[in-house]
Amino acid sequence: MKFAVTLATAGMFLMTSTGIAAAEAAGQATEPNPLLAPWSGPHGGLPPFDKVRVELIGPALEAGMEEQLAEIDRIANDAAPPTFDNVIAAMERSGRALSRVIAIYGVWSSTLNDEPMQAVERSMAPKLAAFSDRITQNEKLFARIAAVYAARDAAGLTPEQQRLVWLTYTDFVRSGARLDAAAKQRLSEINQQLAGLYTRFSQNVLAEEDQQMLLLADEAELAGLPESARAAAAAAAESRGHKGQWAVLNTRSSVEPFLSFSSRRDLREKVWRTFVNRGDNGGEKDNNTTIAEILALRAARSQLLGYATHAHWRLENTMAKTPERAMQLMEAVWPPAVARVREEVADMQAIADAEGAGLTIEPWDYRYYAERVRKAKFDLDQDEIKPYLQLDRLREGMFYVAEKLFGLKFVPLAAGSVPVYHPDVSVWRVDDLEGRLVGLWYFDPYARQGKQSGAWMNAYRNQERFDGEVRTIVSNNANFLEAAAGEPVLISWTDAETLFHEFGHALHGLASNVNYPTVSGTNVVRDYVEFPSQLLERWVATREVLDRFAVHHQTGEPMPPELISRIERASTFNKGFDTIEYLASALIDMKLHLAGATPIDPDAFERETLAALGMPAEIVMRHRTPQFLHIFSSDGYAAGYYSYLWSDTLSADAWEAFTEAGGPWDEAVARRLRESVFSVGNTVDPADGYRAFRGRDPGIDALMRKRGFFKPAPAAQ
């Protein structure tokens, strides 16, 4: 629901009389806080990023919470018999000011997180958790919700309204609405403690990403790096005050190119160890104690709520339904992925031996020798592809896909015509083919200090229409390294897929066509939300996109057909590594949360569990436990990181719906995709939505074919 304040900082948000009195007591002016005002201006209203000051955010959150609590009290104490409109719809109308402030709070937390902003986070996180509990634990409110729920079949509600009633009631129950007073108090204490721990965990990781880097002063230390990587390292060093040197920042976008191309094995090891040990270095930024506390509190909360473990609580309302079903899928994929890794390592070791390198493949060697194998087997290397992958051109390719599949046109807005929170940010108006406004798309592509690593999508405002048309505002955020002035930003093939992936989330929000904000856009269950985004990755490799938008940054020539053919032949290359790197993280996540109240030493648990699984020694988890923002910066993906694999069973099967028909641009399949998946939000059960699109349930065979494993396995659904 709109009141359930969750800020996932890993990836998917007038002063009251009390505030005036406090300001007067401090001798301050009592001007209205601009962050609380309705968004004004063109395009349905714009976030007032030009009016934001960090010191305004905390008071705005406090006032927004106070206002929504008053609104909730009016709903709870309404003397009229409870109905959909005076309970459920009224709750949808509540909290508008707070929603606007939360959107700004989320932007500053994830992209402009300096020490003053971190102080706001530390102060506000427990208060926001307590605020949510005050609503879900409001007994009069829940009684009215329960009455609407009990009468839902006879109330003449639309299917969307029935779904919203069910979701509202279920969310309240799962949040402890039926507990006794003592249990509710304990639950609220746990939620507030967790909110503080999530903030600490996130800030520790950000600090080690911001403060740690490898600074290179000798050009000889750049051996093996292509010119694009050298230029990016020089720009990174200059941005950190080291002009004339080169920096490998402690972020994935900087580390992975270095590990792929640097021929300096000693420096690869140094960069790798710094990156994989974020949050695990002892001292005040070490996250191991924080993780143990989070796990213990989650276990206590699940017991209070009547569930065996946190994993059972989290998965109850997902597609998987139970941890056992999620584990069944992961365990089906693990053995063939491990077998593929053995083959990959053997190929790499053979090259190292033939060159007389005198080494055994270690984790800091994997990407480097994988590139050597790619070249040997497919006459292909990333440095050959990268000159054709210009960030700006690929962005236009995404717009092309959006228009062809979804009928959406992206029109750039002039710089300065829309307030932005940083000069890196650009904004596009999104229209349908008749020129009607659909929403706005903000793009923040570059890495900087204070910005969380990785890539993600945000919704600043959800689409809705039950009280009039409200157009959505979404953003995509990335951490590409800026090029030198006048030079294009060149990205890897993997980065291109990630770019399209996150744009898939944005399209999920932009294509939304529902009435109520709670069921709008990407507000779907966790193991379904990645399906649309993973599916959109497949359009990167289509000839239409490559022929038009993959052009050489110097010559302007399109990518040669022969190079495209080599890319296609190598499409399943290194899938053992990709799968095990991810799946190790997903299995650790699930097993941590299935341990229940058992005390956890995170480092020991990670080490022993991976050993029991037979983790290949040449690979490390994609997200080691001390830096695993997906599961320890919020509840978002906790016991839910398996979702990427679950969703990929859907995306692999859905792609075959296109290939079995007229190809990736088949109009009938695209129409079913829009109508049954992208536009419906959470107004239908996701399994029903998928069946409406595909005509049947998915199985795992398409996933195995996509990854080149081929071995049939039991159906995932």
Image: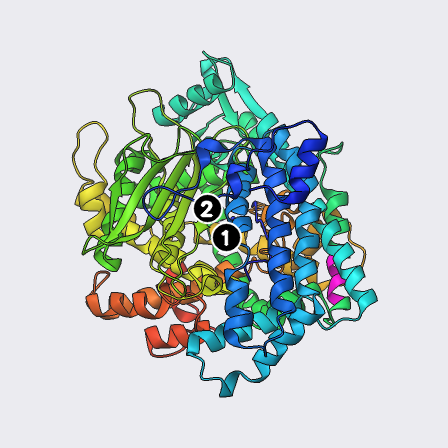
Mark 2 element type: loop
Q: Is residue 302 magenta?
A: yes
Pick the front one: 712 or 438: 438
N-terminal of the two: label 1 or label 2? 2
Q: Residue at x 39, y 58 (%)?
A: 463
Pick the front one: 561 or 625: 625
From the viewer's perspective, tell me whether residue 554 is left or right of residue 383. left
Q: Position of residue 522 (x, y in %)?
A: 44, 59
Q: Which residue is mark 2?
A: 38
Q: CA distance from mark 1 to mark 2?
A: 54 Å
Q: Position of residue 189 (x, y in %)?
A: 78, 55
Q: Quadrant of residue 672?
A: bottom left
From the viewer's perspective, tell me whether residue 709 is left or right of residue 541. right
Magenta residues, as a range?
296-303
**Colouring mode (rainbow / by chain / secondary structure / one colour):** rainbow
Mark 1, mark 2: which one is toward the viewer?
2
Mark 1 element type: helix
Q: Residue at x 71, y 41 (%)?
A: 287
Amino acid type, residue under disc 1 in the picture: Val
Q: Residue at x 59, y 76 (%)?
A: 80
Find out whether the residues at labels 1 and 2 contact each other: C-beta distance under 8 Å: no
Q: Is residue 375 placed above or below 335 in the rendered structure?
A: above
Q: Which residue is mark 1?
A: 341
Where's the N terminus, which quadrant?
bottom right
Q: Position of residue 619 (x, y in %)?
A: 56, 46
